[in-house]
Amino acid sequence: MIVFIITAGGNLDFSSDFLPYAIAFALCYSLASIFMLLALFTGPVSVASLMLSYSTMIPAIYSIIVYDEPIDTKLIAGTVLMIASLFFANMEKKGTQKKITAKWLVYITIAAVTNGGCSLVQKIQQMNVKGGYDCKNEFMIASLFIITIIMVIGALISERKKMGFNLKKGLFLGGACGIANGVVNYLVI
């Protein structure tokens, strides 16, 4: 939220027009975070990261189908490179074994679909809400506030006993990750 509060420069104008989109984004983001974490616990990290990055294809495909956006050489080249990266990441090195299980596949699929849903909701919000791009900071502040509430409730349920320890030990890296994520989302919008 800090990134969006700072980049707004104090010029915020909240409206209920984007609230349904903020809720949808928050649900997608929260589910993507939870299921990515579950995927990281149960399977290969490198492949999970690649699969999550493939979620960018969801808004691209949606834009081609719904908004009749053209299929250009950059989209084709990017798709080919993404497929090649998955192939190379799955190549086993001598003495190593990638453990891809059905559970992991379910987790990473849900994480990828909901992560792609985040970008899709952002695009739809910008296309359907009057001044959609102009309220990007307000949209993201509201979304991230809802996400914070969801994740705190989840942590209180699943990590109550070690929550203080996790906050203390992970504050620096978690904060850096949050700022980097805010910058990425700002650039995506």
Image (cartoon, grey):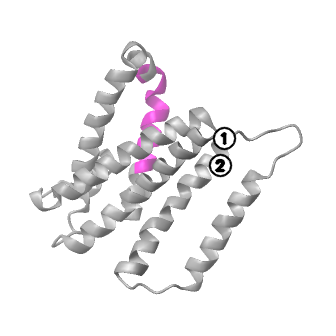
Dot 2: element? helix
Does 189 sit left or right of 16 as displayed?
Answer: right
Quadrant where the C terminus lies? bottom left
According to the image, label 1 marks what residue? 44
**Residue 93 figure quarter:** top right
- At which x and y percent is residue 164? 38, 16
- The amino acid type found where label 2 is placed reads Val
- The amino acid type found where label 1 is placed reads Pro
The residue closer to the viewer here, 126 or 187, is: 126
Dot 1: element? loop
Residue 59: within the magenta?
A: no
Other-residue count near label 1 (Cα within 10 Å), few / some / many at <14 / 14–19 / ≥20: some
Other-residue count near label 2 (Cα within 10 Å), few / some / many at <14 / 14–19 / ≥20: many
**Residue 13 figure quarter:** bottom left
Q: Residue at x 43, y 38 (%)?
A: 34
Is residue 15 something that shows in the picture?
Answer: no
- At which x and y percent is residue 88? 76, 57
The residue closer to the viewer here, 58 or 78, is: 58
The answer to whether mark 2 and mark 1 are in CB contact below 8 A is yes
Q: Cα distance, mark 2 to mark 1?
A: 6 Å
Is residue 175 something that shows in the picture?
Answer: yes
Q: Which residues are magenta?
A: 167-181
- At which x and y percent is residue 81? 67, 69
According to the image, label 2 marks what residue? 47
Residue at the far front: name it: 102
- At which x and y percent is residue 188? 40, 63
Q: Residue at x 59, y 49 (%)?
A: 49
Tally the numbered discs.
2
Residue 171: within the magenta?
A: yes
Q: Residue at x 51, y 43 (%)?
A: 107
